[in-house]
Amino acid sequence: MPSHILLKDGEIHDRATDMRGPGEILATDGVISKIGPPGSVVPPGDGSENLTVLSLKGLLIFPGFIDMHVHLRTPGQEHKEDPETGLSAALAGGITSVLAMPNTIPPVDNACVVESLVHKGEKLRKARLLVSCALTRNREGRELNEYDEMREAGAVAATDDGSWVRDSSVMRMAIDYAHTCGLAALSHPEDTSLSGKGVVNEGRISARLGLAGIPREAEEIAIYRDISLSGLSGKPLHLCHLSTAEGVALVERAKNAGIPVTAETAPHYLFLTEAEVAGYDTNAKMNPPLRTPRDVLALREGIRKGTIDVIASDHAPHGVLDKEREFADASFGIIGLETIAALSFELFRELGLPLDLLSEVLHANPARVLKRPVGLAPGNPADITVIDPEKEWTYRVAEGRSKSRNSPFDGRTFTGKAVMTIVDGEVREDSR
Amino acid sequence: MSEGKTGLPGVPPADLPKDLIDLDGLSERQITTVLDTAMAFREVSEREIKKVPTLRGKLAVLLFHENSTRTRLSFEIAAKRLSADTLAISASGSSMSKGETLLDTAKNILAMRPDALVVRHSASGVPKFLGDRLPCPVLNAGDGAHAHPTQALLDLLTLRIHKGRIRDLDVAVVGDIAHSRVARSDMVGLRKMGAKVRVAGPPSMLVPGLEEEYGVKVYDRIEPAVEGADAVIMLRVQLERQKGSLFPSSREYARVYGMNLERLKLLAPDGVILHPGPVNQGVEMTPEVFESGRSLILRQVTNGVAVRMALLYLMVESPEGPPPEPRQSR
Ligand SMILES: [Zn+2]
């Protein structure tokens, strides 16, 4: 007996299917079967079906948000996060799919690990777990991994995230071969020979605090090289976590020249600056580092113009001992799965950006990069995020679902919250 | 702390913050109070019995994660002259070198119930970290490339004694401005007290934005920086830290940035030379400069004890305990 779920009375924002306004969605057995204006979607009426009708009055319906930059720390550092806590945090934050980064210990660089992660994700039935594998063996930047076998095991992307592939011919081959195998190639653009031992943006704050700086040029040089290689091979390349104004400008130029690159940034780069580091707050220590107000503005403009394709959290859980220590020795990164949707929504409201653009940066663009189904089109998995635009709430990291507590957004009050997360047609989170 | 501790004739209450992390946190008035108090304590150091009972029964823990015999001894002498007990913990010979985390260190120190913690650490921000977690005053005795406020205060005291004032003095700071906690605290302190500050060093030892950030004038040669200066603070070159990456060699450094008798003539006629010590003889300055009457380096050491006595006195809670009596001749 087929099972149906009908979402009605809500407002749909999905640029991919050209839905912008009141509408209804019917999902059957986990797959979207119909979408249309109010009253147009009628469930098959033989009365025998298992039908759930959800009235979403005053709520916004989006295609399921995909967070394509998440460190689930598994295998190896399960004290920081594991698939169960991470994917549960994702659901709480309105995220239907996460792309797990492969810089684990050991790294995800063989089919066995990929398979075990994919299997774990399926068993948990929380947010969808998408797996990325390392670009190079042991993430050393020297030899390519066996992409085809890992793709067959379920991987959708390849990246040495956490490290930049310094050898340009290795990276050139990696971009080419990943494309051949159907994997998205992702780069962590950072020229480590320049960023060195830096821990914060190089500039006023690093000088004032006596901390080693990371010049913005470390990112720019890497982005320029990566763009060149994508142009050389003509194959797509996704640039992770941009933090600089010049990075945005380089991507814009590349796109105008027809080079198939896509770019991502994280909510913290859209909201915070290096000033957060004053007082040696290690929850303001991330890589790339928080930059300056000028960069925040440029990144926001990048979102508006579509130069930046994707917002991803770079969810990077760390234990207390990794963070509560000497600033220079503290780990880089913050958690973000439970705040990415709310922060993005806040940004869009603040900038007056159209909500169907939000469906692009949190769903369609990551889906396109990862070659996943795009939009709320019939036949696609029924992955849906529902936002209550008026709900006021305060993020309390201590009550969060992640195993870790390293967030600079603790205590922040939001208007607008993801209140329902649907994966494969199942309501897996409902806090309406 | 007890509010507005003074008791020194003519010295207004200090109301210092709980911790001394850097001079950013102090106002001109607070710095003046510290210097006034230090002046009074200087006289204690000249007495035959160099001890006052002010902090009797109090415990000052000296946590030195980085070797610095001078600063540690200076604090130790200061604490002892105030009759406080001291406990020195150094990196070698403590669990700090055996993988104890900073959080553990904080907890262990807390358990000792100190009345003050003096901390020297190789990582910037550690005094702030400990200050945020401990109820007692924390005094930064130098952290990473961040700050060295007691050094800056003793430099200010030395200038005030020998120049009669700080305001409108032309002071040059020469050396590795970018990586020096002394330079940073000196710039902040000197500017706060109204001195005009010039800094000089090779470009690799300067950081962009110094002018706006600190209100100083920047030079990449020593000569224009020291010309007509009332005082020149020569920074110590961290020979071990540099290994050719910031400057080709110490020989070349001495040639281009070192102070010698020839360059000494560029200063104002009564211009003086300071140095946080220990001096790399022949690098930052020639032995002739060090031995000349223009060098105040050894007096800085004496003033360092007085400044640290003043800080411990002002920052450590002591319900009673008479203050020193200045000018009480024996
Ligand atoms: Zn990364």
Image: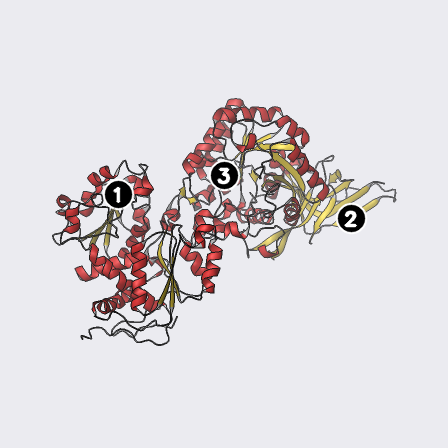
Tell me how far mark 3 sits from mark 2, CA to CA. 41 Å
Residue at 80 percent across and 43 percent down: it is A4
Assess disc 1: are there few (<14), some (14-19) or many (≥20) residues with their C-alpha within 10 Å of its C-alpha: many
Residue name at image x 46 percent, y 29 percent:
A225
What residue is shown at x 76% (from left), y 42% (from top)? A26
Q: Check contact, mark 2 vs mark 1: CB within 8 A.
A: no
Q: Are marks 3 and 2 in contact (CB under 8 Å)?
A: no
Circle 2 chain: A
* Relative to B246, A185 lies left or right: right
What residue is pinned by disc 2? A53
Is the residue B194 above or below the residue A387 in the image?
below
| Label 2 in the same subunit as label 1 | no
Residue A172, percent across and down?
A: 52, 25
Say which mark, if any, is on residue B201.
1
Give the position of the N terminus of chain A as an image quadrant.
top right
- Label 2: element kind: strand
Q: Which residue is mark 3?
A: A242
Residue type (three-letter) at the residue carrying disc 2: Val
The chain containing the residue under callout 1 comes to B
- The reply to whether the residue tagged 2 has its Cβ within 8 angstroms of ligand 1 is no
N-terminal-most mark, 3 or 2: 2
Q: Work out how far the residue at label 1 is from the one at label 3, CA to CA, in angstroms.
A: 34 Å
Image position, residue A127 (x, y; %): 67, 43
Left or right of B141: which side holds A219?
A: right
Q: Nearer the viewer, residue A249 or A224?
A: A224
Find residue B45 and report its horizontal and vertical position in percent: 23, 67
- Of residue B309 and residue B220, the one placed in the foreground of this image is B309
Q: State the count of labels.
A: 3
Q: What x and y, as percent, mark residue B20?
A: 36, 61
At mark 3, the secondary structure is: loop
Q: Is residue A167 left or right of residue A419?
A: left
